[in-house]
Amino acid sequence: MILRGIKTVEYRCRVTRILEQRFYIYAARKPGALDGFAALGCKPGTPGRPGSPGSLPTEVIVGSAVIEKVTRRKDGMFQWHLAHVERAKRYRKPRGMPQPVWFHSFPRK
């Protein structure tokens, strides 16, 4: 949904100070119950490859974005405002297991 421009804000329970730095967007193994993919007519794809039309890639990095700013809602949640979203030219499977917040997807040199 981020890559399609439908989702421009990520809601999190914590603030981040990592602003204006490009980060990877990882497609999880399977869509979560609240991801809204069913409403878009999408089904999970095979790992690393989009399947038939309307399916989504899984377990790969599909793009990148920048957190432009962070605001706090009245309910205490934080809104990470996303900008400069780019779709990956090719999907890459990260080394190691992605973590919920930040992870280094490829070994540092």
Image (spheres, rainbow, N blue to C red):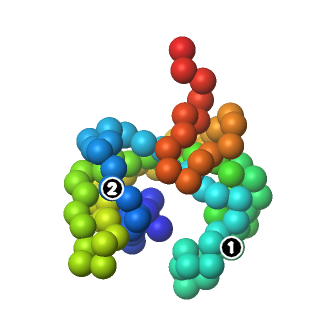
Instruction: Check disc 2: other Cα within 10 Å, few if <14, some if 14-19, many if 20+.
Output: some
- The spot of residue 34 in percent (x, y) is 56, 79
- The spot of residue 104 in percent (x, y) is 55, 34
| Placement of 95 over or under 61, stated as above or below | above
Callout 2 touching callout 1 (CB < 8 Å): no
Residue at point 55% right, 85% down? 39
Residue at point 30% right, 79% down? 75
Q: Tag 2's secondary structure?
A: loop
Which quadrant of the figure has residue 76? Answer: bottom left
- Dot 2 or dot 1: first in sequence order is 2
Q: Which residue is mark 1?
A: 43
Q: Which residue is mark 2?
A: 15
Q: Tag 1's secondary structure?
A: strand
- The amino acid marked with disc number 2 is Val
- The spot of residue 108 in percent (x, y) is 54, 20
Residue at point 56% right, 53% down? 100
- The spot of residue 42 in percent (x, y) is 62, 75
Q: Is residue 15 visible?
A: yes
Depth order, front residue of 66/97: 97
Which quadrant of the figure has residue 69? Answer: bottom left
